[in-house]
Image (spheres, rainbow, N blue to C red):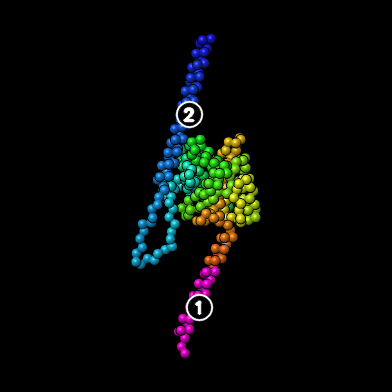
Amino acid sequence: MEKVRKVLLVILLLVALISGVLVLQDYLSRAKEEKEYERLAEIVQTTEESTEELTEEQEPEEERYISPIDFETLTSMNSDTIGWIQVPDTPIDYPIVQCEDNEKYLHTDFNGEPSIGGTIFLDFESSPDLKGKNNILYGHHMKNGSMFKALVAYKDEKYFQEHPYFTIYTPDEEIHLRVIAAYYGVADPETRRTRFSTEGSYQEFIERMTSKCSYRVELEGEIEALYTLITCSYEFNDARTFVFAVPIDEEGNIIYKEEASEKIDESLEETSKEQQGAESNLQEADGEGEQP
């Protein structure tokens, strides 16, 4: 009997030792991934301005957008890079990638190495310029707080109200966004919908997706693009946390389609007035040149 106890004790000690080693390995792996993304953020975030100087013969061109993210470096490291996401007051400060499926970056880091945390990635059916009808971003819910774990805080109404804004950067522009709804639920395939037969069905989709949040921001018009952020949730088996956001202007106002149309109309009206003024000036000049 004593011999059996000793054997059992040895087995228990071995199990505990192996478990401890696995936990340590997991911790070190997660810590390494976190440090790597921090290092990456330091490398690619820049405020450098263009060093090109105009000569006397050159005319100034229209001001060119210069991203604070060094996408040239990013794409040289990973050609799947399409953007960068920053959510204030959270660890979310990561590159965004996209490839031909939704499997690769679940367990592959930005450098192409096997990874528990994976990489933030855009659904392969979403528009790569991040300006499609439904721009779906995925990220893991990591215990150490990295990747998309911070999204679960939006399920709290107070946090939702106090942290409404975040930014997605692309090589061509900054997309400023406002969170309009957040909730947890089943892994519903409909959230992955990116194509719509009519504008009406698209707006109905937005209403249907966001109406599940009791404290959502009520939209006052039609929008051009929806941003859907998804991570795992643990309220029940296979649950997901969904965070929905829409584009805003520099003042933080949601951009509606009507406003965009009005801006276009105003621009066309100003152009028309300028053309009329130019024609009038031309007629006056022609009149001055006429012989009596």
Q: Quadrant of residue 253?
A: bottom right
Q: Position of residue 240 (x, y in %)?
A: 58, 40
In the image, the segment drawn in magenta is 269-292
* Residue in the image at 52% along x and 46% along y: 163
Residue 190 appears in the figure: no
Q: Secondary structure at mark 2?
A: helix
Label 1 sits on residue: 280
Residue type for callout 1:
Ser
Q: Position of residue 76 (x, y in %)?
A: 42, 47
Q: Is residue 104 left or right of residue 216?
A: left
* Residue in the image at 48% along x and 54% along y: 173
Label 2 sits on residue: 23
Question: Does the magenta-highlighted stretch encompass residue 286?
Answer: yes
Q: Main secondary structure of the magenta part?
A: helix
Work out whether mark 2 precedes mark 1 in sequence or the reverse, and give the earlier one: 2
Residue type for callout 2:
Val
Q: Position of residue 256 (x, y in %)?
A: 58, 57
